[in-house]
Image (cartoon, grey):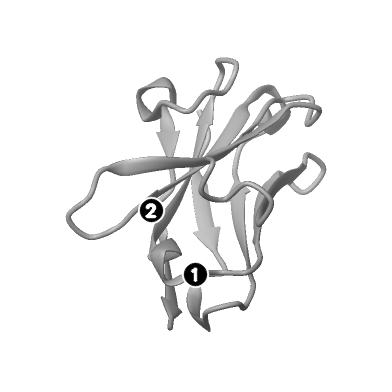
Amino acid sequence: QVQLVESGGGLVQAGGSLRLSCAASGRTFSTYAMGWFRQAPGKERDFVAALRRSSRSTYYADSVKGRFTISRDNAKKTVYLQMNSLKAEDTAVYYCAATHGAGSKHPDDYAYWGQGTQVTVSS
């Protein structure tokens, strides 16, 4: 099992940047593919980015491609989401998730979730 704790959310102006972190517990972090998802009020949880175990394969939602970057540091057992050129529509609670699967865009493929961190982008 793995426990996940997100941090780094906050209030930022449109055009600004934030870096989210997701710290994992347990000794087998490197065996998990990791994903970031987000959920705005009244909406479903949407895929943002995913990163396979090797870090060689990354996947992004079209809405964040070119602005967001997912990365991991297995020694620190942490996955990051660098968010640049933020827009008001990026406002949501951001969740990181872990899976022993390949890593996908589908929330149901992930067995472990953090508690979420709020990102608010003011226009």
The quarter of the displayed image where residue 91 is located = bottom left
Separation (CA) of disc 2 from disc 1? 23 Å
Query: Do the CB atoms of the residues marked 2 and 1 lie less than 8 Å apart?
Result: no
Q: Earlier in the sequence, mark 2 or mark 1?
A: 1
Q: Residue at x 38, y 30 (%)?
A: 107
Q: Which residue is mark 2?
A: 115
Residue 87 image label:
1
Q: Residue at x 48, y 28 (%)?
A: 105
Q: Looking at the picture, tell me which residue is in the foreground, 59 or 111.
A: 59
Residue 13: percent from the left, percent from the top?
A: 52, 84
Q: Residue at x 43, y 83 (%)?
A: 123
Residue 23 image label:
none
The quarter of the displayed image where residue 113 is located = top left
> How many residues crowd around disc 1 within 10 Å: few (fewer than 14), some, or many (20 or more)?
some
> Vertically, is 111 above or below 90?
above
Q: Give the mark toward the camera: 2 or 1.
A: 1
Left or right of 84 on screen, residue 115: left
> How many residues crowd around disc 2 within 10 Å: few (fewer than 14), some, or many (20 or more)?
some
What amino acid is labelled 2 in the image?
Answer: Gln
What amino acid is labelled 1 in the image?
Answer: Lys
Extreme residue toward the top, this view = 101
Residue 98: percent from the left, percent from the top?
A: 53, 32
